[in-house]
Image (spheres, rainbow, N blue to C red):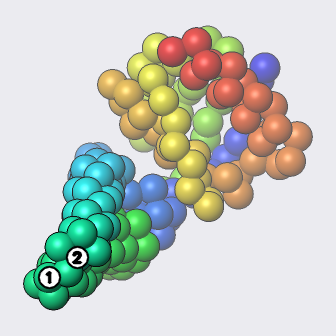
Amino acid sequence: MRIDIQAELTPEILAEAGIAYATKDKVYGAKYLKKRNSQLLRGGFIALLGIVMIVMFFLHKRAEFIVFAAVAFLIGGTAVYSATVGNEKMLYKKLAGAGGETRARRYLITEKKIESSNEEKKTLLRWTDFDRKMETRNTIILLGQRVLVLPKAAFDEQQMTLLQSFLAEQFKKA
């Protein structure tokens, strides 16, 4: 496999990937919604308490259990919404507003490595630097010891198919 692409990393693309950057030398604010799973778990647990309160109401016929159930569903539902839709919208707006410049990069992707370069420097990334991938609507994000954001728009259909199958095989091993 050999994929050679030119890509532009815009503030919007990086914001969608959960990254805000302030300078051309350093990437700041890698977020990846790390809190998302714990928020979902917490929201689900609170909503489960609402179900328990409804069961308690039917067992004991006490009205306060309905009030507790309503509060639990409200808090749990808010937490689940915040962890999913709300967090992403707020995070995207915040990071896209952080500004930054559009950076053009060239990527040479092979079975052994990824070379990322611009007019100032060249970076060599090995596949062992990454242990998982994430996808958004417009990006592929490789995560591990390093972070790499690849805009999907830079790939033609054949290159994307080749990369997707390689990544599926690469991260199946992990």
Residue positioned 69% across, 19% down in the render: 169
Residue positioned 86% across, 47% down in the render: 157
> Are the residues tagged 2 and 1 within 8 Å (C-beta)?
yes
Q: Is 54 left or right of 141, judged from the image as shown?
A: left
Residue 44 locus on image (x, y percent) = 32, 59
Residue positioned 20% across, 80% down in the render: 61
Residue 10 locus on image (x, y percent) = 49, 64
Identify which residue, 158 or 119, lies in the foreground. Answer: 158
Q: In this view, does 29 lie above or below 69?
A: above
Label 2: few (<14), some (14–19) or many (≥20) C-alpha neighbours in 10 Å: some
Residue placed under numbered mark 2 in the picture: 57
Quote the CA–CA distance across marks 2 and 1: 6 Å
Label 1: few (<14), some (14–19) or many (≥20) C-alpha neighbours in 10 Å: few
Q: Is residue 84 above or below residue 64?
A: above
Q: Is 157 left or right of 9, judged from the image as shown?
A: right
Furthest residue to the right?
Answer: 158
Identify which residue, 126 or 89, lies in the foreground. Answer: 89
- Kindly tell me whether residue 72 is visible in this rendering: no
Q: Is 118 left or right of 83, judged from the image as shown?
A: right
- Looking at the rendered structure, the kind of residue marked 2 is Phe
Image quarter hosting the N terminus: top right
Furthest residue to the front?
Answer: 60
Helix, strand or loop status at disc 2: helix
Identify which residue, 143 or 99, lies in the foreground. Answer: 143
Identify which residue, 140 or 55, lies in the foreground. Answer: 55
> How many discs appear?
2
- Looking at the rendered structure, the kind of residue marked 1 is Arg
Q: Which mark is residue 40?
A: none
Residue placed under numbered mark 1 in the picture: 62
- Kindly tell me whether residue 125 is visible in this rendering: yes
Residue positioned 43% across, 73% down in the render: 85
